[in-house]
Amino acid sequence: MRIHRGVAAPGGDGHVVFLGQGAVEATDVETSAESASPRWGAIATPHDVDLKGFYRTATHGQVTFWLFEMVDVTPAVPAHAREITLAQVAGDDGLLPQPINPFSGVDRPCKNGVHGHQSFPTTPTGFIVEAASVGCTTFVNLATGTTAAPAAQVSDLLNLKASFGSWNGDAPSATANTPWGPPLAGERPGTFRNKQNKRNEPRDALLADDFDSPLMRSPASTGDAADGTESPHLQSTVQNAVLGGFLAHEIPTAETVAAEPDGPAASVNPKVRLRIRLEQPAEGTLYWQYHRLVAFGHTMKGAVGSYTGELWIPRMAQRLWNGHWRNLQIKGQCEYRWFFEERYPDGDPQVTGWIGRKPTPVEAWVTLSNDEAGRFVRKDVPIPPVSARGMASGCEVYSVFRYRIRLHPQPAAATSVWGTLPQRDDLFTEARIRARLLDETIETVAGVKYLVGQSELFLYRPIIGDFGPGPDRGRERGPAERDPSAIA
């Protein structure tokens, strides 16, 4: 999250950064007063566009808390100042359908103002991590990082503490001429003294603010364990990044704050403009794959005569829908086939054994159970013997995980166009023995459309010839770059 404070867009202008570990958008499949049927996942907050930030209050039971909210810089319609417009996107054959967001409650291509607040322990859905920030953009609390194992890292930037921060307390006073922040533990006031709030060092306020070439490491300071390890512009909480160094009257508390800061003639209680950009990670990164892969971390570790297979299946993943990333529900909507497969030089691969539950009949699919969602482990799976055809031809043996997910809403040319992911390496597997994800397709079964994909992992190639009895007969370890660990 890049936060520009009191500066005009665009260019190499002043900003601070909150670098944390994001999660898939917090919205689960649910029903509501606006929609009696499941709404099947929110559309993601637009990334790499400017949004306007402000703070507002809300209540949860008897507790007043603060929401940091993001909205359109310039509302498309004045009455919609508390929204984020979802643009219509061009496809290969013209404009895609309008991205009507079922969670807006108004059947329009928009999101309600995206906000964040700390999650509540009594959340009924049970899948939000307590103390994470939630809303439609989620950050997980990672406040225990060290220099050796930072909470978050991008290139040379290290962040040792990343959390949403305090979220409840008194409103900022409109007349107070002191820096403000939500109270800390024990009713202590907030410590937003300057823009470099990573540590309690007043001299940080004098550090040069060269935003085009920011300091990568803090200079030494007495008694600070984080000395020399972090950029002073990487903030530990969203509040620090947004509110650090501002006087109470400068903090915008309504979406009606002007899109640009007050001009030179302004002298009475000016408000500071906050411009926010959520930055999309690069496609070839773990972070990008974590949000989008249906199956990742596909490994098979061998013991004598058996394997233990493992892969991860998230509760939901993002796919492009009408040109925007949207949550695709996996839990309760996924079927799979996980098997050993022999592949021959002349084609016609054959299933030789089952790693996951065996379907009945064998050409059918198995419904992914709640116990299998998340970390899916199959222990001590017997290694099937290589067939006579495989021994004669020199086949290759793979672990294959095929999945199909019922799409909601169902594809329809005028209203609902889903995207698929092309083939790629699984970056959650070891570089020397990467699992591979094949091109996804959308297939129709009995009138129902499914997203279909496959993760596969090369295991071994049998040696042609008789090399004596024993469990390793007919197996070779193979080149290190292809098979360093699959065979014990």
Image (spheres, helix red, strand yellow):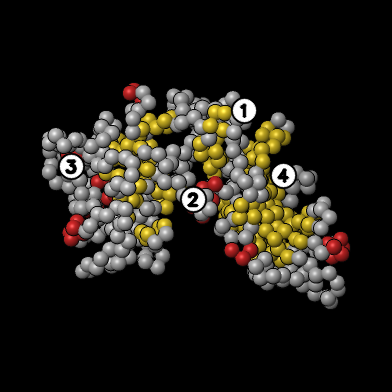
Q: CA distance from mark 3 to mark 1?
A: 50 Å
The residue positioned 62% from the left and 60% from the top of the image is 434
Q: Are marks 3 and 1 in contact (CB under 8 Å)?
A: no
Identity, as a three-letter code, of the amino acid under mark 3: Ala
Q: Quadrant of residue 340?
A: bottom right
Q: Could you tell me residue 178's position as x and y percent?
A: 14, 46
Mark 1, other Cα within 10 Å: few <14 / some 14–19 / many ≥20: few
Q: Looking at the image, is 328 positioned above or below residue 482?
A: above
Mark 4, other Cα within 10 Å: few <14 / some 14–19 / many ≥20: some
The residue positioned 51% from the left and 39% from the top of the image is 325
- Specify which label sits upstream in the sequence, 3 or 4: 3
- Residue position for label 4: 365
Q: Are marks 3 and 2 in contact (CB under 8 Å)?
A: no
- Residue position for label 2: 282
Q: CA distance from mark 3 to mark 4?
A: 60 Å
Disc 4 on helix, strand or loop?
A: loop
